[in-house]
Image (tube, coloured by chain):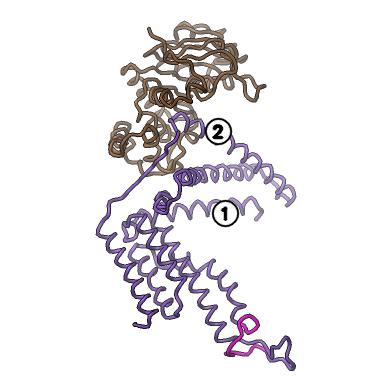
Chain colours: A brown, B purple
């Protein structure tokens, strides 16, 4: 299996004092679905941002597509375009991700950055909207959308570039069951298309449904375990220590 | 009613106004069908025309134009007039009022308010002058008409289309992007502020005094600022993730229709009539 991301001894802290990640080493392979499991504040989102080249580690190394991920690498326009086309990031908060006034603008943003022609962008927007069932809200303002619709638009805004690698931060958080299942089905389709998926979540049921492998981040912001999803989820004491389950059970 | 309720009411009114205005944009009216750049240019042209009008009969003629366009654009006349006449012209009237008196605009007396026994600062009394009334009327009509045309733009055009249309006036793309994003986040922050007040109201038992109200408000302003910083960080990262770089060209062009030609014809006709009237041909 070829490697997409390779992290070795990665440390990250905010403002030089708030530690978010400590000594993270992991490898993510092509076409696998990898779950980053951890309680609130364990560093899942930070790790995703490092994988997307948005943050750069204070210590350690990150390699993506056999190229080191660094600020210097992103100063190269060629690499930047290659990487942004290859990797798409769906943020946890759609209000961060959807920063333009209408749904149509939002979906068109990434292809415009890449420099697609206007006709191509127009057809791409309507094609994606139709596929995701959001053609009726293209002219709507994001503040008038439900959380489920916002999430669909956030996914659509990434889908326009059809990336090979999908990074999703808590994709089913605060969604109703119908929207949650829509996300699950969407991710299963991505898996069929052999896309590489990295999901940060604390929902173990969801992770079990879609992930092949996972890692667990503990309260010390370190990797407590890494392996195939079945075996990691069987380790109840580890999950309890990492605040992913509670002795009283998990509220569904 | 304490400040919490007042603020809540104002927020609700602001959101409602915005929602109601966008309802007009969706209507199948004349101005709604005009290409935004042509509409903005035409209405700005009319505002400039109003500012240069030197004949009262012309200004009175111009008063009919926004009314006709509002009717053609399916905007209820009562709503349109209320929107124009409630605040800004009252403000304009207040500004123009001193100009009608002889101590600001000397001239021929129309109506004496008071007569002095002796002249004070070379005035024999306070009276309304013909010239003063004339200039006050000019100021009032010019402001009212400019407001009327601006309201027509706002009521019949999506805010995003107005911003895109600014490109026709060579406004840089980065400014347009900032304006578009500002519009997007105003509503996020309005909701946040609304939630602050609702949360306070839900736990308020006694009426709060002014001082504690100010303390609480300043604290919330700080929290809002912090939230806005966090959000801006998220937005920046999201833009980076979507490949934001040297270009951010967003265009939404509407094809030119028969209505657009009719619109241009109407604007040019008004301009031509004004020129002829100024040359005393009409």
Q: Residues within 10 Å of mark 1 (few under 14, many from 20)?
A: few
Task: Looking at the picture, tell me which residue is in the foreground, B53 or B185.
Answer: B53
- Residue A129 percent location from the top left of the image: 32, 35
Subunit of label 1:
B
Choose the circle earlier in sequence order: 1 or 2. 1
- Asked if residue B181 is positioned above or below residue B268 in the image, the reply reads above
Q: Secondary structure at mark 2?
A: helix
Q: Mark 1 and mark 2: span between their CA atoms?
A: 29 Å
**Residue at the image point whose x is 28% and y is 64% from the top:** B262
Task: Looking at the picture, tell me which residue is in the foreground, B130 or B268.
Answer: B268
Quarter holding the N terminus of chain B is: bottom right
Was residue B106 drawn as part of the magenta stretch in this picture?
Answer: yes
- Residue B13 percent location from the top left of the image: 52, 54
- Residue A143 percent location from the top left of the image: 46, 42
Which contiguous range is marked in magenta?
B101-114
Disc 2: which residue: B233
Subunit of label 2:
B
Q: Residues within 10 Å of mark 2 (few under 14, many from 20)?
A: few
Which residue lies most toward the bottom here?
Answer: B117
**Residue at the image point whose x is 42% and y is 70% from the top:** B49
Disc 1: which residue: B10
**Residue at the image point whose x is 51% and y is 20% from the top:** A70
- Asked if residue B225 is positioned above or below residue A177 in the image, the reply reads below
């Amino acid at each position: 299996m070829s490697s997409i991301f390779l992290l070795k001894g990665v440390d990250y802290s905010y403002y030089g004092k708030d530690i978010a990640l400590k000594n993270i080493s992991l490898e993510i392979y092509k076409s696998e679905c990898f779950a980053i499991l951890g309680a609130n504040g364990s560093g899942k989102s930070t790790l995703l941002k490092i994988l997307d080249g948005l943050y750069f580690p204070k210590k350690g190394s990150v390699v993506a597509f056999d190229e080191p991920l660094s600020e210097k690498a992103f100063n190269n326009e060629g690499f930047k375009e290659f990487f942004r086309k290859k990797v798409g990031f769906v943020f946890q908060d759609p209000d961060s991700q959807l920063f333009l006034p209408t749904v149509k603008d939002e979906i068109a943003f990434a292809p415009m950055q890449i420099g697609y022609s206007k006709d191509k962008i127009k057809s791409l927007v309507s094609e994606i909207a139709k596929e995701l069932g959001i053609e009726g809200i293209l002219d709507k303002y994001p503040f008038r959308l439900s959380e489920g619709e916002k999430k669909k638009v956030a996914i659509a805004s990434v889908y326009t570039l059809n990336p090979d690698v999908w990074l999703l931060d808590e994709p089913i958080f605060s969604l109703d069951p119908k929207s949650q299942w829509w996300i699950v089905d969407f991710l299963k389709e991505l898996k069929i298309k052999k896309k590489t998926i990295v999901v940060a979540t604390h929902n173990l049921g969801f992770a079990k449904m879609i992930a092949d492998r996972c890692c667990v981040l503990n309260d010390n912001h370190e990797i407590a375990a890494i392996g195939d999803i079945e075996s990691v989820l069987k380790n109840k004491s580890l999950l309890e220590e990492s605040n992913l389950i509670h002795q009283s059970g998990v509220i569904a | 009613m304490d400040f919490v309720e007042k603020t809540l009411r104002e927020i609700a009114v602001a959101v409602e106004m915005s929602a109601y205005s966008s309802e007009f944009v969706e209507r199948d009216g004349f101005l709604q069908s005009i290409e935004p750049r042509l509409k903005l240019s035409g209405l700005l042209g009319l505002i400039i025309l109003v500012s240069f009008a030197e004949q009262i009969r012309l200004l009175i003629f111009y008063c009919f134009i926004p009314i006709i366009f509002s009717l053609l654009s399916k905007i209820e006349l009562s709503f349109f007039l209320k929107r124009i006449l409630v605040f800004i012209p009252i403000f304009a009237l207040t500004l123009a009022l001193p100009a009608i008196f002889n101590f600001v605009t000397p001239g021929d007396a129309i109506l004496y308010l008071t007569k002095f026994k002796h002249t004070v600062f070379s005035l024999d009394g306070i009276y309304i002058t013909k010239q003063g009334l004339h200039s006050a009327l000019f100021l009032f009509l010019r402001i009212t008409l400019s407001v009327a045309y601006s309201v027509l733009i706002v009521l019949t055009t999506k805010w995003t289309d107005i911003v895109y249309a600014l490109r026709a006036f060579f406004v840089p793309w980065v400014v347009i992007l900032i304006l578009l994003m500002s519009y997007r986040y105003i509503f996020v922050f309005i909701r946040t502020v609304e939630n602050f007040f609702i949360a306070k109201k839900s736990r308020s038992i006694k009426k709060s005094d002014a001082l504690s109200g100010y303390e609480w408000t300043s604290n919330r302003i700080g929290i809002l600022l912090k939230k806005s910083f966090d959000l801006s960080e998220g937005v920046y990262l999201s833009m980076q993730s979507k490949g934001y770089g040297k270009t951010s060209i967003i265009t939404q062009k509407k094809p030119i229709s028969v209505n657009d030609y009719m619109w241009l014809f109407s604007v040019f006709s008004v301009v031509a009539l004004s020129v002829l009237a100024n040359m005393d041909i009409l």
